[in-house]
Amino acid sequence: MSNARTARRSRTFVWLSVAMVFVVLAGAMLYEPDRSVASLQSRWAPPPSVFRPIDGLAVHLRDEGPRADSTPVLLLHGTSASLHTWDGWASAMAPGRRVVRVDLPGFGLTGPDGAGDYRIERYTRFVVAVLDSLRIPRADLAGNSLGGEIAWHVAARHPARVRRLVLVDPAGFPIEAESMPVAFRIAREPALAWMMTRTLPRPVVTASVRNVYGNPSRVHDSLIDRYYELSLRAGNRAALPARFAQMRDGADTLQLIRVDAPTLLLWGARDRLIPPSHAARFRHLLRDARVLVYPDLGHVPHEEDATRTVRDALAFLNAM
């Protein structure tokens, strides 16, 4: 019996050793090094992009449209996105409105926060610092997902700085995802998250982007290029699991009752990450809110169909 047990343990050791060698070899084959800002800048930060020192970071931002606009629009992207997600909105808004968009800490070309702080309080302070740096006393804020959560926190804590809000599939309540992008699932698992800092197969990014679109056929190669290459910006892959580890979904949603700014909620009915049922929760707590739902769009309706969504946003923001 003892010899049989010893033999089984020996075989188990051999198989574990083989598995470890396989993991190491696979990791070596899939290894993808970080990319410097300089290597990414020519494609993803041509004019009007600038890098501005704000709150200890070299912040990638774009500031477009007429400077005479007394209440600019500040656009805030979601997790693992960048200011480019708002390209369609910015093009439509800039002829008549001053439009500012930034890469949030941990994403895009702004890169990781020096202190590794990705709490919502840190992002709220960051947005106020952006407004202060650009000498914008009051703005209209629009945000998607994480950006939406940041926007309503700014409105709740600094009401004098926000005139109107557009929340696009915003975060805030506990996540009840029907389906989560594979990259997010990996980043939320501590045992797997380390792999993300060393590897990032392009198919993982493709599947993740397709997951948040209502119609995945709208996802094209240049869109994947953007998400993939900016995710490789030095420090971004380590920032994503840190961000998830610091999330406190639903911990302070009662702060929504402090929001005075009139609010437009835009939601994709095919959002499987933050379901459209959350819109009713927001509307219940917000003092002045209306909801528009797009039957064919997903979690990023502003990117998936910029023409339709920006038309509704502008009608709300420009209303007297």
Image (spheres, rainbow, N blue to C red):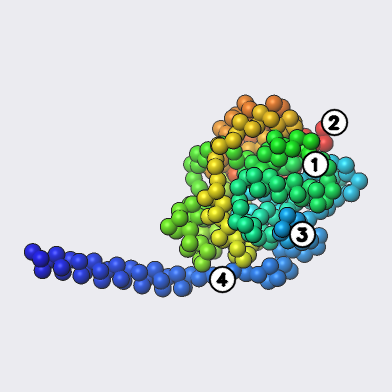
Question: Which amino acid is tagged 1?
Answer: Ala
On residue 320, which mark appears? 2
**Which is more foreground, mark 3 or mark 4?**
3
| Residue at figure coordinates x 70%, y 37% from the top left | 157
On residue 53, which mark appears? 3
- For marks 1 and 2 on the same chain, the one whose residue lies earlier in the sequence: 1
The secondary structure type at the circle numbered 1 is strand
Vertical relation: 161 (above or below) 24: above
- Residue 70 percent coordinates (x, y): 88, 42
Callout 3: 10 Å neighbours few (<14), some, many (20+)?
few
Tell me the quadrant of the picture where the C terminus can be found.
Answer: top right
Callouts 1 and 4 close, C-beta under 8 Å: no
The secondary structure type at the circle numbered 4 is loop
**Which is more foreground, mark 1 or mark 2?**
1
Q: CA distance from mark 1 to mark 3?
A: 20 Å
- Residue 319 percent coordinates (x, y): 82, 32
- For marks 1 and 4 on the same chain, the one whose residue lies earlier in the sequence: 4
- Residue 187 percent coordinates (x, y): 50, 55
Q: Is residue 172 visible?
A: yes
The residue identified by callout 1 is 139
**Which is more foreground, mark 1 or mark 3?**
3
The secondary structure type at the circle numbered 3 is strand
- For marks 1 and 3 on the same chain, the one whose residue lies earlier in the sequence: 3
**Which is more foreground, mark 3 or mark 2?**
3
Question: Which amino acid is tagged 4?
Answer: Pro
- For marks 3 and 4 on the same chain, the one whose residue lies earlier in the sequence: 4
Vertical relation: 100 (above or below) 291: below
